[in-house]
Amino acid sequence: MNKIKNILNKNNLSREDMKYIFKLEDKNQLQYLYDYAYQIKEKYVDKKVYFRGIVEFSNICEKDCYYCGIRKSNSNMDRYTMDEKEIIEAAQWAYENEYGSLVLQSGERTDNEYVEFVEELLKKIKSIGDGALGITLSLGEQSYDTYRRWYEAGAHRYLLRIETSSKRLYEKLHPSNHNFKSRFQCLQNLREIGYQVGTGVMIGLPYQKVGNMVDDVEFYRKFNIDMVGMGPYLKHMDTPLAKKVINFDEKKQLQLGLKIIALTRIVMKDINIAATTALQALNPVGRELGLKAGANVVMPNITDKKYREYYKLYENKPCIDEESKECRSCLKKRVESIGEKVGFNEWGDSPHYFKRISQKE
């Protein structure tokens, strides 16, 4: 126990310290890690959880990532795009149910029709409650101009997961026409335009080494990221990567997911960190465990139920049969069961973002 205490008492963790944490197996030391991260969360971002109602409005995607269930080449996937009216109704529901913030997520498209569709959608969502809803986008790699148009139309946060900070590993996870440098340039563009910038990685990937995981956390620190959505890798059997997985260990994947949440909270004290649905896919109380390890954001699904089964990035995705109202009630009880409260009617922006822009000025 003294080893983990000594590590966490340092002002700055070294690479070797982080490697030690990622290799931890002892239950008592792990609990100490999670408790320590939770204390930092309580000090810097409070014991408050922010709901981001997520609308997965289309599973049509130009990308062909080897790990993703909605990849372009998956011919077993029924494709859909919600119409504007359905998306606006979901946003209105989020507003009326005090969510404070909305996430618009879809497969990646860059055509003009799509860009204009999102732009007009944002303008109409901003009219709900006279701009009451905060809006996060998670719509992949786009041009600088597209990001600017969407920002000016009303979006103020953007989540673009890098999935890994390792070029070598990235190239094993993507076809040759997917560009590692382009993804990083997108993050730079988002920051320059003025977004609160979010990213994230998968952990427990085939080919991934402990050093890669350390690099991921160090990337968050180096890039001075505002928010993180990350989680354990989960298989989808209609993907090439799933065939590379041997002896998939759900317990180990969950543990890795909690470790990176805790470590990221310790290193980046005042950012927003999501307890992702992937954690719940591995354990019925996975999201609660994520919150207790340092996360402070949850993204309940408010997509029309008839579409949810078609937006499966991985298998065994939870909550696809729940009505939005049921999900709200359930999550509220889950949050309160661990002694926290929900920040209803609050955008819940990253404190780190405000510190970052004030230092820039």
Image (cartoon, helix red, strand yellow):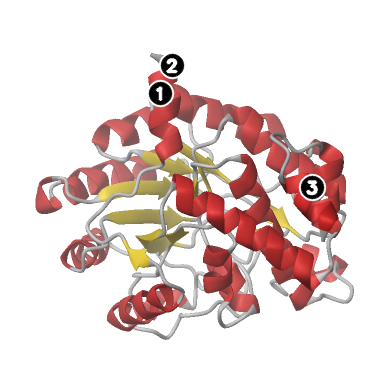
Label 1 belongs to which residue?
357
Q: CA distance from mark 2 to mark 1?
A: 5 Å
Which residue of the protein is positioned furthest toward the top in this rendering?
A: 361
In terms of image quadrants, where is residue 328?
bottom left
Whichever of labels 3 and 2 marks the residue nearer the N terminus, that label is 3
Assign a secondary structure to mark 1.
helix
Q: Which residue is mark 3?
A: 6
Direction from residue 304 to residue 281 in the image, left or right: right
Give, as a three-letter code, the residue at label 1. Ile
Disc 3 versus disc 1: nearer the observer: 3
Residue at label 2?
A: 360
Q: Circles 2 and 1: CB distance less than 8 Å?
A: yes
Location of residue 110 in the rendering, given as x and y in whole percent from the top left corner: 47, 41
Residue 155 in the image: above or below residue 355? below
The residue positioned 63% from the left and 37% from the top of the image is: 220
**Around disc 2, counting alpha carbons within 10 Å, would you say few (fewer than 14), some (14 to 19), or many (20 or more)?**
few
**From this viewpoint, which residue is outermost toward the front?**
2
Q: Residue at x 77, y 39 (%)?
A: 215
**Lateral position of residue 21 relative to residue 141, left or right:** right
Asked if one can make out residue 328 in the rendered structure from this viewpoint, the answer is yes
Q: Position of residue 112 (x, y in %)?
A: 38, 38
